[in-house]
Amino acid sequence: MKTIAIVGAGPGLGMSIAKKFGQNGFRVALIARNEEKLNQLVVELEQVGIEAAAFQADILNKAQIGSAFAAIKEKYGFIDVLEYSPTPGIDTLANPLDVTEENALYQFQFNVLGAISSVRELLPDMLDKQNGALLFTTGGAAIHPVPMMGNVGIAISGLRNYIFNLNSELKDKGIYAGHLSIGIWMQPNSGVQDKIADIWYDMYTKRDRVEEFITEDKV
């Protein structure tokens, strides 16, 4: 059985991705800061027959990220897929005129350094096996500037560059790196999250494209 680790797991898109991969033979390792909420998600997954476990970590804390992945490896062994999709709080967003060194650095640490730390925990094993996938979910500001996300866009557009470079370096080594950029607002219980999870699984299995930009006409 394969294992997917979802960083930034929550009750919305993270759970839809967990269920989609879980229904296709994956065990699910959920990583986020709030352990109580993670445990609730584990129960929900187990109720639909998906094996899952919670691993607490703050994405801003490199040591905690390392400990979480070490615990996953100890429990499940090789991690086949990383899905990285932590979402910054709305109170951390800044429009271009309000961007400061501090709030730009926060988004870089949250979106980019957390991703790099996660990748570095998994990549050596993936290279040894010549197999694996690194999936990154971001907002539409990674591709098209969104003024209300002035500081976020600086970070996730850089993350997008990293993802494309990863794919270029790894595609001939059996490892897929992909980017899914969501350019719509996802309302709770709208079913959009499930459709996006379907797109992610299609990208993962086909590995025929590095990126999808999610717009209203795609969901």
Image (cartoon, rainbow, N blue to C red):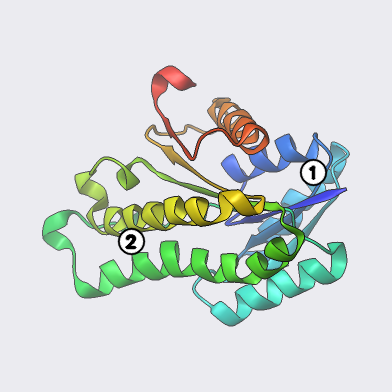
For the question of whether residue 28 can be seen, the reply is yes
Task: Please report whichever mark, 1 or 2, sits nearer to the chain's N-terminal start.
Answer: 1
- Using the numbered discs, state the Cα–Cα distance from disc 1 to disc 2 in whole angstroms: 30 Å
* Label 1: element kind: helix
Compared with 58, 87 (above or below) is above
**Could you tell me which residue is drawn at 57 percent across and 57 percent down?**
8
Residue that extends furthest to the top in the rendered view of this protein:
217
Residue 87 appears in the rendering: no
Task: Find disc 2 in the rendering and name its residue.
Answer: 92
Total marks drawn?
Answer: 2
To which quarter of the image does residue 66 belong? bottom right
Tell me which amino acid carries mark 1.
Leu
Residue receiving disc 1: 45
On residue 79, which mark appears?
A: none
Left or right: 35 as drawn, with respect to 1 = left
What type is the residue that disc 2 sits on?
A: Thr
Give residue 206's quadrant in the image.
top right
